[in-house]
Image (cartoon, grey):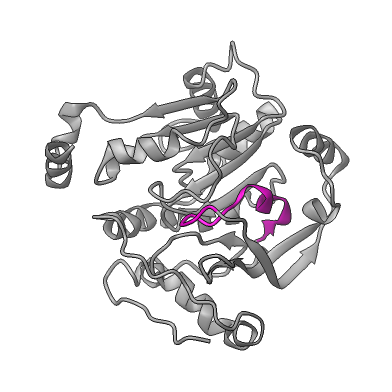
Amino acid sequence: MQKLKYITTSAAVAFTEVRVKRLNRIQIMRRRLLQWLVCPLCHHALTLGIIVSKQQLPAEEDYQILEAIAPIEDPAQVEIDIISGVLACDACRIYYPIYNGIPRMLVYPTRVAQLHAQENRTWLTTHLAGFDLPQRIPPPGEQEVLRNFSTEWVGYRWTGASYWSLTPDMVLRCKRYELGLYRRNIKHRLVLEVGIGIGGTADALSRAESCELVGMDLGYAVDQAQYYFGQNPLLHLVQASVFAPPFRPGSFDVVYSHGVLHHTYSTRAAFTQIARLPKQANGMLYVWVYSHDQEQATPLRRVGNWAE
């Protein structure tokens, strides 16, 4: 196996700085998620390699919801949960770690990928010789965004009583209004949230609407979301970049993103990427970003606006 290479920057060690740890609660990736994941670089199908897994049967009610969204052809899709593993792309000869039960789909070196490689060196050498971690250059400013928002969310503690200054019920009502759910039924639909944060909204929405929801986030907020809401069988979590989403075009009935894309170096480029993800027939895309005036508040966005 080739020697793994890593870059050393403040963003690359963000995973250590924000002190995300394996907590007492077992954190898992549901095998069912694999049917929607692809290599974010070439969009080829991925091969699952399981290092640690456990069996967990879903409740009958949840099974029926999942079956209505996408037929369960293999019981292992909903009965086998992955704690640690890899998603390998044969076309690119690279692999993406599954660490703390979360697929890590960023296409450049990160601290969490390094930790996974160190902890599973023997398994990787035996089962994945000739594969390496992705080594792309990150989009401008993305490592800083990863570090800053990871610090913010990992330090946030969910109590179930309030979500910032709002009650969970109010947050859910606001989200239902934003998405127009008073006139659009998303029951038994597949939904993607781009920028899931700690996951409180996604968890509530999936349960209230009986939909299956994939939450994607750039930073280590996904670890907090996994800790607090990972036992929800209708919720999946993925760490990935909006500039390289690991999904096939036209995969989702609904894609929404609130207050996220304007934090990138190019809102236009980010929007172009996620605009490919809703289904062409009756798919929906909802995006909320800062206004042009609000975006002038930071030097990075002023440069980005000028470039666009």
Q: Tell me residue 210's x, y (percent).
A: 71, 30
Give the residue drawn at x 46%, y 57%: 41
Instruction: Identify which residue, 80 or 86, lies in the foreground.
Output: 86
- For the C terminus, the quadrant is top left
Residue 36 falls inside the magenta stretch: yes
Q: Tell me residue 34's x, y (percent).
A: 67, 54
Extreme-front residue of the structure? 91
Q: What's drawn in magenta, residue-wise?
A: 28-43
Q: Tell me residue 228's x, y (percent).
A: 59, 51
Residue 272 falls inside the magenta stretch: no
Give the residue drawn at x 36%, y 65%: 136
Q: Quadrant of residue 304?
A: top left
Q: Say if residue 161 shows up in the picture.
A: no
In the depicted structure, whether residue 15 falls above or below residue 304: below
Instruction: Identify which residue, 35 or 208, lies in the foreground.
Output: 35
Instruction: Identify which residue, 17 or 115, lies in the foreground.
Output: 115
In the depicted structure, whether residue 230 falls above or below residue 19: above
Q: Quadrant of residue 17?
A: bottom left
**Would you say 147 lies left or right of 234 here?**
left
Q: Say if residue 24 shows up in the picture.
A: yes
